Image (spheres, grey):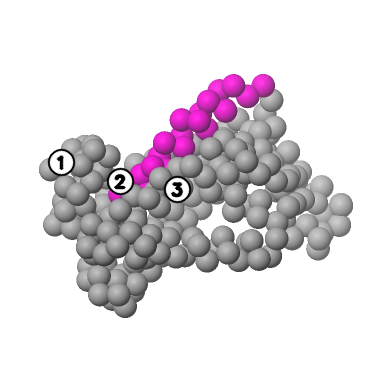
Amino acid sequence: MNNLALLSALVFEPRKAFDEIAQRPRFWFPLLLLLVASVGLSLWYVSVVDIQWLTDQTLRASSFAKRLTEAQMEEAIARSGRGAAIAQAVIVGSLGLVVLRLLESVYLLLSGKITNVQRSFRQWFAFSCWTSLPGVLAVVPAALVLLSATSPQIPQADLQPLSFNNLLLHLAPTDSGYLLWSNFGVLSVASLYLSSLGVKLWSGRSWLFSVLFATLPVLLVVGIVLIRS
C-alpha cells in the first residue's frame, strides 16, 4: 500500500490502515505533510501581518511584559523585524512539531509497556504522525481568513476559526484557558478520535480503555486549565 492509498484507507478503511502502519511503520510522508502545512501557513502569516503590531500584542499578553517598562516594550517593538519572524516561524515551527510528535510517541510507548500494548517506538512514531494528519486541514480555513483579511493586523487566534475558543468560548487573550482553547478544536478532536480508534484496533481492548490511553495527556491538561479557571 503506497502513502496515498494509506491516507485514503485511514478515512475509509481504518482497520487496513492501522494494520499497514503496524507492519510498515513509515512516517516521512505524514510528517512532511504536517511540516509543510504548519510552516507554510506560518510563513504566509508573518509575510502579511503587521510585525510591530503582532510583537506589541504578543508582549502585552505575556507574563514577561510585567517586568518591562513601557519604554523597554516600545524599544523591543521597534527592533522587531520580519526577517526574525520568518526565521522563528521556520525553526520554532519545525522543531516544535517534531518534538511534539516525539513526546507523544514516548508517552504511547511507555503507556503501551504498562498496559501490555506492545509496539516499537518506530510504530508509535508512525502512529502519531498519521493520526495527526487532520491538522493539515486547518490550512484551508486559515487560508480563507488570510485571503479575506482587510487589515494586516490579524490576531494569530483568528487563523484557527475551528478552535473551541472561536466557535464557543470567545475568551480574551488575558483570560485563563485562552491559549489552550484557541489551539484546540474540531480538528484536534478528529485526531484524538483517530488515535483512540487506532489504539482500539492495535490493542483489541474496549473503547473506554482506548480513549483513555490515547487522550490521557490532553485530559490532564484540560483538567488543570479548568481547575485554574
Image-based side of 45 in relation to 133, left or right: right
Viewer can see residue 156: no
Write the residue at 52% across / 66% down: 220
205 or 53, which lies in front? 205
Quadrant including the C terminus: bottom right
| Bounds of the magenta segment | 128-150
Quadrant including the N terminus: top left
Element marked by disc 1: loop
As drawn, 147 above or below 182: above
155 or 109, which lies in front? 109
Write the residue at 56% across / 42% down: 163
Query: Is residue 146 within the magenta segment?
Result: yes
Q: Label 3 to label 2, Cα distance in Å?
A: 18 Å
Check disc 2: other Cα within 10 Å, few if <14, some if 14-19, many if 20+: many
Disc 3 designates what residue?
Answer: 189
- What amino acid does circle 2 point to? Pro
Question: Which of pointers 3 and 2 lies earlier in the amino acid sequence?
Answer: 2
Element marked by disc 3: helix
Write the residue at 16% across / 51% down: 20
Query: Is residue 118 within the magenta segment?
Result: no
